[in-house]
Image (cartoon, rainbow, N blue to C red):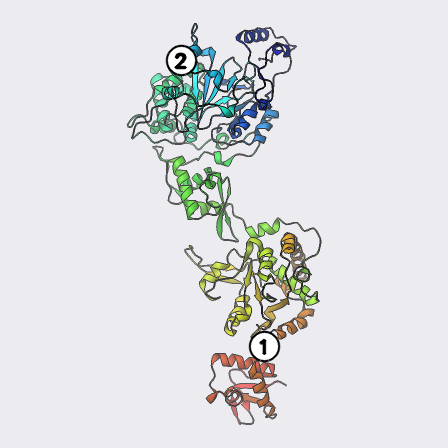
Amino acid sequence: MSRRPADDVFRNVPAPPASDPSFGDPLFDPTPEQYDALGRWLDGLDAHVPPPPETNPRQLQPYRDAGLADALIPLHRWNHSDEKGERGKTPRDPQWRRRMYTPAEIQQWIENGSYNDPGGNVGFRIPPGWIVFDYDPRNVPEGRDVLAEFRQKYGIDLMAFPRVRTGSGGLHAYGRAPIDLRVRNALEELHGIEFKALGRQVVAPGSIHPCGFPYCWLAGPPLKEAPEWPQQLLDAIKRPEPQAGAQEEIPLTEAEALLRRLDPTDFQDHDRWLELMMAFHSATGGSAEAADVFIDWSTSDPAYTNHGELIRQRWDSLKVRAGGVTVGTLYHRVIEKHGHVPPAPPETVFDAVGGGEADASSRRPAFTRDANGKILKTLGNAMEAIRALGIDPQYDWFRHRIALRGDLRPLAEYKVGDIWDDNVKTVVKVLISERDKVEFNQLSEAAHALGLENSYDSLVEYLDSLSWDGKPRIAEFFSTYCGSENTAYVRGVARVFFLGAVARAYRPGIKFDTMVVLESPQGQNKSGMLDRLGGDFYSDGISQRGLAHPDTVDSMQGQWIIEVPELAATKRTDVETLKAFLSRRKDRARLAYKESSADYPRRCVLVGTTNDASYLRDHTGGRRFLPVTIKRADLGAVERDRHQLWAEAVAEWNSASAAARQRGEPEWKVLVLDERLWEAAAAEQEARTPEDPWVDLVREWLDGRPDRVVVGVRELLAEAIGKPGGRCGQEDSARLRVVMSRLGWEHAGKDGAHDPVLKKTVKGYRRCS
């Protein structure tokens, strides 16, 4: 195994002027004679040698200065080897072309590596707009000076470009090029020179060659100031465009997975091997990165380990032509060997490294196909296509919609949101079509199915994420944050509100028919306070079409704290509807874009707001409304303490509901106002009920007839109220019943009662004893 040369070997190597301090370590440019000396030193190594070299991360600074840090990738450790031979210059991960690495990941790899491969080299994944000139003197025919020939033919002074001395004595030169330029790997007349571009990688400076020598920057312009390669060279290395009608590409990752299912030793027959290369070339569009994959596969056959350059020349000689050998041949060979197209092997499905998390966006789709290798347009394949994008659909049971998590960077480029809708569907369709060359019509169904596999409840998730600090706040919420009086009644109402909201979150449809009503003059931040308290789960009103309209249920979904504004303007009939609405524990409706009706247990609490103090139209059902007068709400304090308020409410609900279960009581009973506060609540409700003028009219009429114990409805309406003929509508009947109840009379029922004065049975009221 090669070792590092002693430190004194480089002692007399001159360093270039420090023209660019960003390069960090001193740069060195050993002469060929010095490299020969290093080689002789290596040949004479004995057991007493220094430890092997380590990758120098400071040599990566020029990439960061040039804005190319995201193009750095981990390579194997310099002395790593396997059955294919030395691997110190090869990428660590199968999906290195697509996977993104953070600077922290690169640094961690340099320092620690993985369990079986401590520490590692770093590569530069060549991005669009860059070409790296790669000179390897080991491949130059004896007696030729290829660098001089290159300089003479193209008039290029390589000293004008950022350069790297490779560990084997070669040279890398970095230059710019048009972003859309596709280049040949080499020029036939210049042996030992390659042109590496998009889809390929080179070893970065600071890394160690398998022979033990480091790669290092040479004196010259910094990488961020790299010039463009001259047009004459670009014209010479430009790859011809594929002919019209050529076989459409499949993703390289998919083609590579198929190729890896084949044993290269089964293709030692030249014609059989050439046919497979033509199929792989057609499938991938003949790209340079595809060439690297095919060469790596071919040279894994020990009989052809050293044939890489020859295979590359054969690859470059191929043309993508319509009607030639296609990807179908590749599928045919895989099916011939395995009987089917196997799914992607687990070790290449993700770029999992060293036990770390995989980058989901680099996963290869494991499609099911027909006998010709064509992707089947099934629901399962549509689901697989979405998974392979790195997108993780999750169904939110609270909002009844599909939220998107995972790697959303592909969607961000199109400026769409993280909720599945028509815009997201269109973008996903485009992404899959570009990557997999197939269009699915069941993408929404696929996203829904994936979401149900990994569903969650956003409201419960929020509440479960909270941790209470132990400081009580909710009992005195209205007095502390809203300026209300600090009475036992107001404290009781606050507890009912907070526990009711949390109970509806954890126990959908639990009985809770109470509505807190906040009163104050206009401009005292009632709505703003509820907005801060509810956060993303607050709504400033339900359907404007009325509580009975089907849209109302739809508008309530995904809302937790719902404001019912301007309660004072509500008519008597609307109040009756509101009472019935409050009593409902579930709603049946067909939501928008749903195919069928369903039951939706209540997850919300309603909070009324009003600028008036007279909004309860009668005295029946008033127990459902709990009025609280507030002054000016402190919005900043509510927003500051919001999470702690709900955390305390969760803790209180858990304790109270557990105690109720232990007593054998239903949980909803802990949501009822304390019985000791009912009298105070009744007084508050009475104060909000305007006096009906019929009360005085009927009281005066009855006071003049003290002997009456039974009285009929028509008689009351005609003589006490003054309605001609005693005509009685439904609203009159309900209103009269409230009035008589307040005066101490009860309804006689549908059969009526005997009136001893009129000596007949009448439908009306009897005096309470």
Q: Amino acid at mark 2?
A: Leu
Quarter of the image with the N terminus in it:
top right
Mark 2 Cα within 10 Å, few/some/many (few <14, many 20+)? some
686 is higher (above) or lower (below) than 709: above
Instruction: Name the foreground residue: 63 vs 661.
Output: 63
- The residue wearing badge 2 is 190
Quick one: label 2 or label 1, which is nearer the N terminus?
2
- Please give left or right for residue 212 compared with residue 428 in the image: right
The quarter holding residue 269 reads: top left
Q: Which mark is residue 107?
A: none
Quarter of the image with the C terminus in it:
bottom right
Q: Amino acid at mark 1?
A: Pro
Report x, y in % for residue 768: 61, 85
Report x, y in % for residue 239: 36, 23
- The residue wearing badge 1 is 690
Mark 1 Cα within 10 Å, few/some/many (few <14, many 20+)? some
274 is higher (above) or lower (below) than 511: above
- Please give left or right for residue 340 compared with residue 90 in the image: left
Report x, y in % for residue 150: 41, 13
Is residue 549 visible in the rendered image? The answer is yes
Report x, y in % for residue 640: 64, 52
Instruction: Name the foreground residue: 9 vs 227.
Output: 227
**Residue at image point 35% right, 28% down:** 327
Is residue 670 visible in the rendered image? The answer is no
439 is higher (above) or lower (below) than 632: above
